[in-house]
Structure formats: C-alpha cells, structure tokens
Image: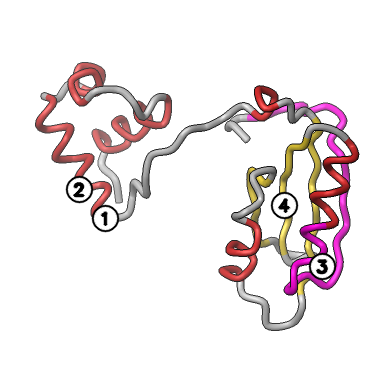
C-alpha cells in the first residue's frame, strides 16, 4: 500500500519519468535523496515496475485503431497470451476479460491493410482459435494514454 507521498511521487513520475529526483522532491516536498530512497523502495517492492517511453502511435503514422477479441484454445494461460502478443509493436494494450472472448487487444496501425495484416498474424498464433475485430471510428473519452 502506498502512502500519500509515494502516490504523489508516482503521479509525478507517470507524467514524466525523466524528471530528476530534485525536481520530484520540489514538487512533493522532499529532498532529492529522500525521493531516491522512496523510488528505490517502490521499485524493490514492485510498485514501480520500470520506466518506459510512451510513443504517440500517430507519430509512427499509425492512425487506424482497432480492437480484437481473442477466443483462445482451451488451457491457454494469460501469460501465454501476453507472451504471444508482446512482440507486436502495434499492440498497445491487451487484457483478459469476462464474457465469451478470452482477451481484448487494442492495436494501432497505419491503415486498413496494415490492420488486416496484424489481425491475420495474431489469428495465426498457436493459442488463438478465432478472432472478432472492430475498428474505432472516433475515440470519445480517454483518461489514460493508449
């Protein structure tokens, strides 16, 4: 469980993980060494899993967004699904879900043909029995980056 200071540090890092400990400290009311100790503790506990770059898919020319429902073969674990999908740069999120589908995958591609190619490759994964896909026309509300 994070305390209030940890939560504030995580929010600042989520906005820009390249901020210095001194800058984070100035924003949350701690010294740079105190921020470093807390970040180290958060990393050791697994609360912070790593630091990464969030790329806007449009910068890559990927403006076509789609959602793919995966219907997997029996006994397919969520870890097997994650491993199978993580090598596709077009996949920006994937989640197991309730209902008929086993997982829902969000992808960004350059155009319809690119979407079709990604869909065909994912459908060809050994754990996938079948897929169902939809294209996003207009995102109406996003609270987090895709």
Q: Earlier in the sequence, mark 1 or mark 4?
A: 1
Residue 49 vs residue 102: left or right? Answer: left
Disc 1, disc 2: CB below 8 Å? yes
Q: Quadrant of the C terminus?
A: top right
Q: Which residue is mark 2?
A: 41
Disc 1, disc 4: CB below 8 Å? no
The tag on residue 45 is: 1
Query: Image quadrant of residue 104?
Result: bottom right
Local packing at callout 4 (Cα closer than 10 Å; few below 14, some 14-19, many 20+) is some
- State the separation of the CA atoms marked 3 and 1: 35 Å
Q: Nearer the viewer, mark 3 or mark 4?
A: 4
- Observer-nearest residue: 62 or 106? 62
Q: Earlier in the sequence, mark 3 or mark 1?
A: 1
Q: Is residue 143 above or below residue 69?
A: above
Q: Is residue 35 above or below residue 88?
A: above
- State the separation of the CA atoms marked 2 and 3: 40 Å
Q: Earlier in the sequence, mark 3 or mark 4?
A: 3
Secondary structure of residue under mark 3? loop
Q: Which residue is mark 3?
A: 100
Percent across and percent down for residue 35 are 17, 32
Q: Which residue is mark 4?
A: 105
Local packing at callout 2 (Cα closer than 10 Å; few below 14, some 14-19, many 20+) is some
Secondary structure of residue under mark 1? helix
Secondary structure of residue under mark 4? strand
Q: Nearer the viewer, mark 4 or mark 2?
A: 4
Query: What residue lies at 75% left-to-right and 67% top-to-bottom?
Result: 125
Q: Nearer the viewer, mark 1 or mark 4?
A: 4
Q: Nearer the viewer, mark 2 or mark 3?
A: 2
Percent across and percent down for residue 39 are 23, 40
Residue 141 on the magenta segment: yes
């Amino acid at each position: 469980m994070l305390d209030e200071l940890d939560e504030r540090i995580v929010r600042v890092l989520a906005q820009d993980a390249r901020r210095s400990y001194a800058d984070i400290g100035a924003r949350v009311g701690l010294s740079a060494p105190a921020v470093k100790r807390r970040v180290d503790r958060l990393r050791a506990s697994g609360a912070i899993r790593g630091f990464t770059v969030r790329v806007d898919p449009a910068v890559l020319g990927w403006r076509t967004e789609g959602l793919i429902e995966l219907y997997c073969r029996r006994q397919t674990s969520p870890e097997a699904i994650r491993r199978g999908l993580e090598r596709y740069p077009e996949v920006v999120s994937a989640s197991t879900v309730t209902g008929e589908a086993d997982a829902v995958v969000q992808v960004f591609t350059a155009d319809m043909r690119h979407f079709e190619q990604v869909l065909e490759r994912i459908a060809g994964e050994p754990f996938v029995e079948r897929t169902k896909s939809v294209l996003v026309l207009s995102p109406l509300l996003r609270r987090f980056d895709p």
